[in-house]
């Protein structure tokens, strides 16, 4: 890194280059390749601190965003993605719970540059290079390389969706192998890939449900909370689009999810688990009726939580019950509606924006179920709705 400059110099140079790239005509086509070389060399230098490497990766993304024609025309993309892959797989995978070190942050930022490339460069230029990376590194004995392959597939799927959909028969075995990997970080990346594939590649991804769901069942049995949570996310994303094909898997899905919900002490995992159960209900529709009462008993316990740290989980349970009711229909859920409406009203005065937002959603679902008969609920709801509008209360929740 000596030839690149010290940390402060590299950070400054990358920032200045960012600014120049944003200006029309300030950077000529002949200068694009040297800029790419500089940024990639800095990003790959493990002797540098986090900030200059972050700036270098941002410069790579900016270069693709502002000069993608030159990047493609000058055939810079193959070397750029190969070197970015090395950054994405550098530093090993560390201890299972060591996700906040600098190398961990760097590999995630490198993956974000792949995401930018997939979004901005036509897939005919990107997809062959991704397939080459997969063929080269998916069989690697190095778990950091296998994780990098899965992470890159996950984040590039949306940008290259049409090309990805055609290649799923070739790509899914790589994902299944990731689910079976001995390293929890690799399993977690495989679940992320399934979840993001489900969001971007349906209906094609759904054709693989007979192998996807059993692999997710196995990952749910993982001892590590982060992996369980990621598996729940994948199940949630997959099942909400699955429709009637979910029926043969309903019993094992709900058995595993409800068991996990009752036995894990990690609240983020519990929240993911409840969201996954809600997605299963949405996918199953009327077929969920046989499971409604035992699942409602679990949700009822969560709806009674009042400790501040438990309110986000209560919010997810509120959403889940509303979606369960919509799935099975009014006749099947009528015996619990009065109780749930009472609990929902009791939660609105609490200082919990997330709970309030999900509770408003629940009442929307009740209105859909009851039609005009929901009118008596409007007067007690109105003060809370007006207050929320006056405060412009908008809460953003993470999807991954």
Image (spheres, rainbow, N blue to C red):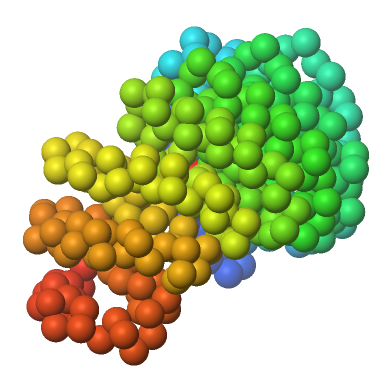
143 vs 199, nearest the viewer: 199
Picture coordinates of residue 209 (x, y %)?
77, 45
38 vs 258, nearest the viewer: 258
145 vs 323, nearest the viewer: 323
Residue 78, placed above or below residue 240: above
225 vs 251, nearest the viewer: 251
Judge from the rendering whether residue 339 lies leftward or rightward of residue 237; answer left or right.
left
Q: How many marks?
A: 0
Residue 207, placed above or below residue 5: below
Determine the residue positioned at 86% across, 25% down.
136
Determine the residue positioned at 73% across, 45% down.
248
Dividing the image into 4 quarters, which one contains the N terminus?
top right
Residue 219 seen from this side: yes
Picture coordinates of residue 379 (x, y %)?
14, 83
Picture coordinates of residue 201 (x, y %)?
74, 56
Residue 125, placed above or below residue 8: below
Q: Can you name the residue that lies furthest to the bottom here? A: 372
Q: Quadrant of residue 255?
A: top right
Q: Quadrant of residue 73?
A: bottom right
């Amino acid at each position: 890194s000596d030839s690149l400059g010290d940390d402060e110099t590299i950070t400054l140079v990358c920032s200045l280059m960012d600014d120049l790239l944003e200006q029309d005509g300030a950077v000529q086509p002949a200068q694009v390749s040297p800029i790419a070389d500089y940024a990639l060399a800095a990003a790959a230098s493990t002797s540098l601190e986090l900030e200059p490497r972050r700036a270098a990766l941002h410069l790579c993304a900016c270069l693709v965003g502002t000069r993608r024609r030159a990047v493609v025309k000058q055939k810079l993309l193959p070397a750029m993605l190969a070197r970015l892959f090395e950054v994405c797989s550098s530093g090993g995978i560390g201890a299972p719970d060591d996700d906040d070190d600098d190398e961990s942050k760097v590999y995630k930022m490198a993956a974000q540059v792949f995401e930018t490339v997939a979004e901005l460069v036509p897939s005919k230029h990107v997809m062959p290079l991704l397939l080459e990376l997969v063929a080269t590194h998916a069989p690697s004995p190095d778990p950091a390389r296998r994780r990098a392959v899965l992470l890159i597939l996950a984040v590039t799927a949306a940008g290259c969706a049409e090309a990805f959909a055609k290649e799923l028969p070739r790509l899914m075995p790589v994902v299944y192998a990731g689910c079976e990997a001995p390293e929890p970080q690799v399993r977690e990346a495989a679940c992320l890939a399934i979840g993001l594939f489900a969001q971007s590649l349906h209906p094609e991804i759904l054709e693989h449900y007979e192998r996807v769901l059993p692999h997710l069942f196995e990952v749910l049995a993982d001892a590590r909370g982060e992996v369980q949570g990621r598996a729940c996310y994948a199940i949630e994303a997959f099942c909400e689009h699955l429709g009637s094909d979910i029926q043969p898997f309903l019993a094992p899905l709900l058995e595993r999810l409800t068991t996990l919900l009752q036995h894990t002490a990690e609240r983020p995992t519990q929240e993911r688990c409840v969201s996954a159960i809600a997605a299963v209900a949405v996918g199953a529709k009327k077929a969920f009726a046989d499971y409604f009462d035992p699942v409602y008993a679990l949700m009822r316990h969560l709806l009674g939580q009042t400790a501040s740290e438990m309110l986000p989980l209560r919010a997810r349970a509120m959403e889940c019950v509303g979606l369960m009711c919509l799935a099975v229909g009014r006749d099947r859920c009528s015996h619990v509606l009065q109780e749930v409406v009472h609990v929902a009203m009791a939660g609105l005065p609490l200082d919990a924006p997330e709970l309030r937002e999900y509770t408003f959603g629940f009442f929307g679902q009740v209105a859909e179920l009851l039609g005009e008969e929901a009118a008596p609920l409007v007067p007690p709801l109105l003060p809370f709705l007006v207050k929320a509008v006056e405060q412009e209360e908008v809460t953003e929740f993470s999807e991954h």
